[in-house]
Amino acid sequence: MILSDMDARPVLFMDSGIGSLPYGVFFHNANKDETLICAADRAHFPYGPKPREALIELLSVLTEKLIDRYNPKILALACNTASVSALKALREQFPRLPIVGTVPAVKPAVQASLTRRVGVLGTERTIEDPYIAELAARYGPDCEITGIAAPSLVEFVERRFALADSTERLLAVKPWVEKFREAGADAVVLGCTHFLLLLEEFKTAAGETMGVYDSLEGVSRRVESFLDAEGGKLRSRCGNRAPPVLAVSGEAPLEPYWTLLADFFGFSLGRI
Ligand code: DGL
């Protein structure tokens, strides 16, 4: 291996808040040589209630800042809201930066559903976007989709995740799972990256009779395929062992909670 084959620039996962963490950690566990940055756009959280145009605007400014500050070799939008709203615009604006989007796991869910009823839990913006219906029409046109927006659960994850015990987490998840059960769904798609931090609780609440589907592996694979393309020329092979960075936006001093979160995941804190 010659030194010029190594690309030590970071892989950057971003979200409105802490939703990039489960995706970044999943990727990191299988790709320890890569430098990882998870960006949390605290200044603009939450994305869910914002219109598409506002999201395109703020994500384009944020991406520019992230490029200036961290010079990533790949950007993964670990955010369904950002992906349905701005992926295309960002790819057009930053043609030299490979950008991976998050696609809700509608395909495996509709393929597995026996009741032919599938639930999708996301933000307001994601649920109202025609993209979910397009995915369902492509992979399971006979399937009925129940889309539910859960902004209060996004808020819970963002503010309480590292403080809540397992009982509180399970209680937060249960009412949403019950709504899907009442709708006759036997498969539920976690269509917001924040909810992956409650994956175990979702699985517990769903029990044996309801499958829970997510995009963790899909996003990680997509990032890996960019790294491995053309003989792996974007791969880092320098044995990086620096802790991943949780990079947080916003002018105001960071609340102590961010230190708690970074410690919880074994990240160091950075700024955008
Ligand atoms: N985590 C995000 C998603 O996947 C957005 C949450 C929010 O900021 O509303 O959609």
Image (tube, rainbow, N blue to C red):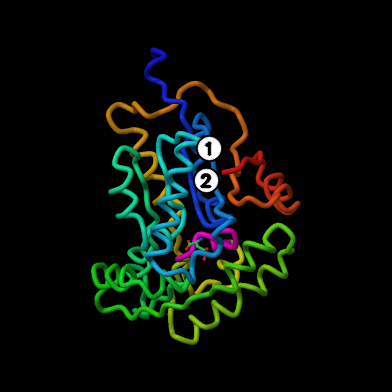
For the residues bearing labels 1 and 2, Cβ distance under 8 angstroms = yes
Most foreground residue, 111 or 208: 111
**What is the x, y in percent for residue 204?**
60, 68
Indicate left or right for 10 with 142 as reference: right
What kind of residue is marked 2? Answer: Gly
| Residue found at the far bottom of this picture | 182
Residue, x 49% and y 87% (percent of image)? 182
Residue 24 bears which disc, if any? Answer: 2
Most foreground residue, 148 or 118: 148
Residue 170 bears which disc, if any? Answer: none
Residue on which the image places disc 1: 36
The rendered magenta stretch, by its main secondary structure, is classed as helix
Q: Please rate how many residues cluster around mark 2, counting C-alpha atoms within 10 Å: few if below 14, some from 14 to 19, many from 20.
A: many
| Residue found at the far front of this picture | 251
Rounded to the nearest whole Å, what is the CA distance between mark 1 and mark 2? 7 Å
Residue, x 40% and y 80% (percent of image)? 146
Indicate left or right for 258 with 180 as reference: right
Q: Which residues are magenta?
A: 191-199
Q: Please rate how many residues cluster around mark 1, counting C-alpha atoms within 10 Å: few if below 14, some from 14 to 19, many from 20.
A: many
